[in-house]
């Protein structure tokens, strides 16, 4: 979809009439770009309208080595969009969605040949934003997940909850509808990504009372999630502490059921030490960068162990906070530099 942003830290009301910046983004596309930036082989599946704007989007993704052969073009609908006002200090960032009537929200599931799309794949990543858009999009998501399970393709579900969406079934409140659909998606997944807030507020899954330590809380929560969704093999929990719009602490807990072990990143040999990000440039897409790097590691377990997967993914998410736009233009070498201790932001000559 298209992201519209006022320049710098302006609000929309300050920018229009006038100048507004446009770029491309969207959860699965963001993760696909991160995988491609790392040298991974990744296909992007979606549907876009005919016309120059969507042509530009696909050409841009192709230029970043994302395979877009599985993107369906249609005369139905338009390009989805959102407006982002970037917050600062105590003023939160604000997102306004324009997804109704988009091609992806209107194209029925029969147009997606998931068997063809998924043949030969190892993982599929689906975002929780996607089924929130419309009933039609939700049906396409479930068809993708069910086909993946039939073909033996592992499913990674990123539990993004957007309270401004989920308006497509009047029989339910948005949070009731989200809980119903997202639970069905996770039920058939192998790996789920999320955070304590969304699991608690949307799915009613929380860590036990009285646990103060963040790493112990996240490990306990991961085990509670596994109890509710026993077919899961992995749980990845984003451990973001928000001090202000421009100052966050950031890290990851990655729980592996088979080993009954949580890997906390970043850490030294014994202690979790979150990334201190005190001058955020742009945090939108950081979770998608983490998801993309996590899947890149999971597709390369011949060279990564689980602790390295967690460290690599957390570092990618951290560095994404330094990049303007949805896409994280960070490569493998830059992540490795951060992991090796180069975190002062000097000049590389």
Image: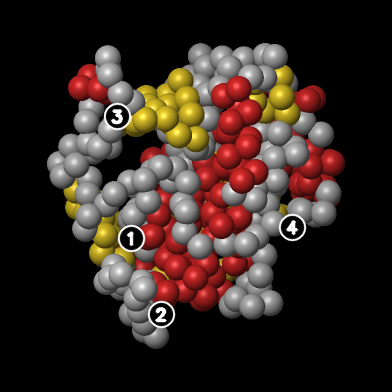
Mark 2 lies on a secondary structure that is: loop
Residue 126 point in image, percent of width and height: 61, 43
| Residue 250 marker | 1
**Disc 4 or disc 3, which is closer to the eye?**
3
- CB of mark 1 within 8 Å of CB of mark 2? no
Q: Distance from label 1 to label 2 (Cα)?
A: 18 Å
Count residues near mark 1 (Cα–Cα under 10 Å), then give few for <14, some for 14-19, many for 20+.
Answer: many
Which residue is more in the foreground, 70 or 225? 70
In the figure, residue 47 lies in which quadrant? top right
Q: Distance from label 3 to label 2 (Cα)?
A: 36 Å
Residue 342 point in image, percent of width and height: 34, 76
Instruction: Say if 21 sits above or below 122 in the image.
Output: above
Count residues near mark 2 (Cα–Cα under 10 Å), then give few for <14, some for 14-19, many for 20+.
Answer: few
On the rendered structure, is 253 left or right of 192? left
Instruction: Say if 64 sits above or below 163 in the image.
Output: below
| Residue 207 marker | none
Q: Residue at coordinates 42% horizontally, 58% vertically from top-left? A: 317
On the rendered structure, is 93 left or right of 150? left
Which residue matches tag 4?
Answer: 122
Q: Distance from label 4 to label 1 (Cα)?
A: 28 Å
Residue 120 point in image, percent of width and height: 82, 54
- CB of mark 3 within 8 Å of CB of mark 1? no
On the rendered structure, is 122 left or right of 347? right
**Disc 3 or disc 2, which is closer to the eye?**
3
Mark earlier in primary sequence (4, 3):
3
Q: Distance from label 4 to label 3 (Cα)?
A: 39 Å
**Disc 3 or disc 1, which is closer to the eye?**
3
Which residue matches tag 2?
Answer: 340
Which residue matches tag 3?
Answer: 6
The quarter of the image holding the C terminus is bottom left
């Amino acid at each position: 979809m298209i992201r519209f942003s006022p320049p710098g830290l302006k609000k929309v009301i300050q920018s229009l009439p006038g100048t507004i910046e446009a770029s491309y983004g969207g959860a699965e596309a963001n993760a696909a770009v991160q995988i491609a930036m790392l040298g991974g082989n990744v296909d992007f599946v979606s549907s876009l309208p005919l016309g120059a704007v969507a042509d530009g989007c696909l050409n841009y993704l192709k230029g970043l080595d994302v395979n877009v052969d599985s993107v369906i073009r249609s005369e139905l609908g338009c390009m989805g969009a959102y407006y982002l006002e970037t917050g600062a200090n105590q003023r939160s960032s604000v997102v306004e969605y324009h997804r109704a009537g988009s091609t992806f929200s209107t194209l029925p599931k029969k147009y997606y040949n998931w068997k063809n799309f998924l043949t030969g794949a190892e993982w599929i990543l689906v975002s929780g934003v996607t089924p929130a858009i419309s009933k039609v999009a939700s049906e396409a998501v479930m068809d993708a997940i069910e086909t993946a399970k039939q073909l033996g393709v592992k499913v990674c579900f990123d539990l993004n909850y957007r309270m401004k969406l989920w308006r497509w079934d009047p029989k339910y409140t948005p949070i009731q509808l989200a809980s119903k659909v997202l639970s069905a998606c996770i039920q058939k997944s192998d790996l789920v990504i999320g955070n304590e807030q969304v699991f608690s507020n949307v799915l009613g899954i929380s860590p036990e009372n009285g646990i103060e330590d963040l790493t112990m809380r996240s490990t306990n929560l991961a085990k509670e999630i596994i109890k509710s969704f026993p077919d899961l093999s992995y749980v990845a929990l984003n451990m973001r502490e928000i001090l202000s719009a421009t100052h966050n602490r950031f890290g990851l807990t990655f729980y592996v059921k088979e080993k009954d072990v949580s890997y906390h990143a970043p850490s030294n040999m014994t202690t979790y030490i979150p990334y201190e990000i005190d001058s955020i440039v742009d945090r939108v897409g950081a979770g998608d960068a983490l998801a993309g790097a996590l899947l890149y590691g999971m597709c390369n377990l011949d060279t990564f162990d689980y602790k390295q997967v967690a460290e690599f993914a957390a570092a990618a998410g951290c560095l994404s906070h330094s990049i303007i736009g949805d896409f994280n233009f960070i490569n493998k070498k830059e992540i490795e530099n951060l992991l090796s201790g180069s975190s002062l932001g000097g000049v590389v000559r």
